[in-house]
């Protein structure tokens, strides 16, 4: 857990590919709300992609191009989910917030 005055890892990177952080005690500010919405979107997309992966693997496809695309998408989704998890571990729990 962190205190409110510590940095929040945001669910995007800067133009140079480095992590972005938000320094604010205002959890209801515009950037905090935007980050919350993006995190929710990323988690939803990861869930949908996981279901899609199950379907492809259940079909026992031998289409290497399709499997390569799936692996690339799963890698991106896993990166996003890990960033969300890291950010949430560092933030204090606020009732009513994801």
Image (spheres, rainbow, N blue to C red):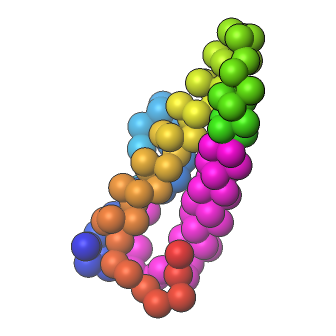
Principal secondary structure, stretch drawn in magenta: helix
Q: Is residue 29 magenta?
A: yes
Decide: is 61 above or below 64: below
The reply, left or right, for residue 14 in relation to residue 89 is right
The reply, left or right, for residue 49 in relation to residue 92 is right
* Number of numbered discs: 0
Residue at horizontal 26 percent and vertical 73 percent from the top: 2
Whole-percent x, y for residue 86 in the image: 36, 55
Whole-percent x, y for residue 21 in the image: 41, 56
Decide: is 97 above or below 75: below
Whole-percent x, y for residue 34 in the image: 63, 66
Residue at horizontal 74 percent and vertical 26 percent from the top: 59
The reply, left or right, for residue 15 in relation to residue 7 is right
Magenta segment boundaries in residue numbering? 22-51
Task: Locate residue 64: give its quadrant.
Answer: top right
The reply, left or right, for residue 94 in relation to residue 62 is left
Residue at horizontal 53 percent and vertical 31 percent from the top: 75
Task: Locate residue 53: give its quadrant.
Answer: top right
Q: Is residue 69 something one can see in this rendering?
A: no
Of residues 57 and 35, the one nearer the viewer is 57
Q: Does the magenta stretch include residue 91?
A: no
Q: Is residue 95 something one can see in this rendering?
A: yes
């Amino acid at each position: 857990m962190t205190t409110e005055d510590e940095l929040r890892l945001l669910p995007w990177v800067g133009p140079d590919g480095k992590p972005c952080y938000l320094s604010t005690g205002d959890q209801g500010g515009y950037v905090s709300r935007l980050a919350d919405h993006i995190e929710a979107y990323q988690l939803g997309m990861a869930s949908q992609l996981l279901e899609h992966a199950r379907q492809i693997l259940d079909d026992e496809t031998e289409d290497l191009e399709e499997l390569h695309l799936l692996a690339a998408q799963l890698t991106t989704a896993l990166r996003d989910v890990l960033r969300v998890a890291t950010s949430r571990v560092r933030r204090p729990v606020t009732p009513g917030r994801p």
